[in-house]
Image: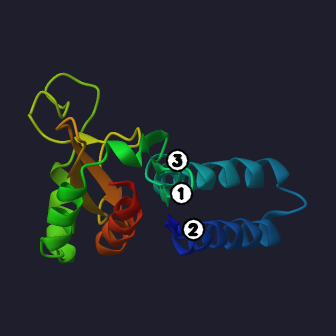
């Protein structure tokens, strides 16, 4: 089985900075300025929410799990039977060079599959992004594999090589 660990450092840092700022403000303002303290704390929360939205999005739409016992590849909200995955495409993706940080950021900037005209992967003849998200999060690696029916699938992952190795190992008994 392969399960990607989701990073929690960014969320912990953001929440920690928020709490330190709110407590520091509270030490100066409380108890006489409770209303002002609540308003400013809420304003700080409006800054915090976008900062933790990306890790939450990664957890929902780009969590990758290969489960050979159940015969499933789970990516975000989608489940793909391992029997539907083309093993040759997985081995071909494994042979490709591992992209560096600059290439990953550039690729994720162009990997959009939003439900808008012109931004759908099918409109651009690009691989369909699996999982339910609209784009590959900046900095994440992505791999392209195909199904036995020939549909190209793009999967956002934190470690493309480890994911493809686990997927190839899970497909060995299936194929």
Q: Residue at x 79, y 66 (%)?
A: 26
Camera-side mark, 1 or 3: 3
Image position of 71 (left or right of 137)? right
Q: Residue at x 25, y 42 (%)?
A: 147
Residue that carries the numbered disc 2 in the rendered image: 14
- CA distance separating discs 1 and 3: 13 Å
Q: Residue at x 41, y 43 (%)?
A: 131
Label pair 1/2, CB-CB below 8 angstroms: yes
Report crowding for label 2: few under 14, some 14 to 19, many 20 or more residues within 10 A (C-alpha).
Answer: some
Q: Residue at x 73, y 73 (%)?
A: 24
Label 3's element? Answer: helix
- CA distance separating discs 1 and 2: 7 Å
Residue that carries the numbered disc 1 in the rendered image: 52
Image position of 63 (left or right of 127)? right
Label 1's element? Answer: helix
Image position of 30 (left or right of 11)? right
Q: Earlier in the sequence, mark 2 or mark 3?
A: 2
Image position of 103 (left or right of 17)? left
Label pair 2/3, CB-CB below 8 angstroms: no
Residue that carries the numbered disc 3 in the rendered image: 60
> Foreground: 91 or 31?
91
Residue 47 at x, y percent in the picture: 53, 54
Which residue ends up furthest to the left in the rendered image? Answer: 125
Report crowding for label 1: few under 14, some 14 to 19, many 20 or more residues within 10 A (C-alpha).
Answer: some
Quarter assignment of residue 142 = bottom left
């Amino acid at each position: 089985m392969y399960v990607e660990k989701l990073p929690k450092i960014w969320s912990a840092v953001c929440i920690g900075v928020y709490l330190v700022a709110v407590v520091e403000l509270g030490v100066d303002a409380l108890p006489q300025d409770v209303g002002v303290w609540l308003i400013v704390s809420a304003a700080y929360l409006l800054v915090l929410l976008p900062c933790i939205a990306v890790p939450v999005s990664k957890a929902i739409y780009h969590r990758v799990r290969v489960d050979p016992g159940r015969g499933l590849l789970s990516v975000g909200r989608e489940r793909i039977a391992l029997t539907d995955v083309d093993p040759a495409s997985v081995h071909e993706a494994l042979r490709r060079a591992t992209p560096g940080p600059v290439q990953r950021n550039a690729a994720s900037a162009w990997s959009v599959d939003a439900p808008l005209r012109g931004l759908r992967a099918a409109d651009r003849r690009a691989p369909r992004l699996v999982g339910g998200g609209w784009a590959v999060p900046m900095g994440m690696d992505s791999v392209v594999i195909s199904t036995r029916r020939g549909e190209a699938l793009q999967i956002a992952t934190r470690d493309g090589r480890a994911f493809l190795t686990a997927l190839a190992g899970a497909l060995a008994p299936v194929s």
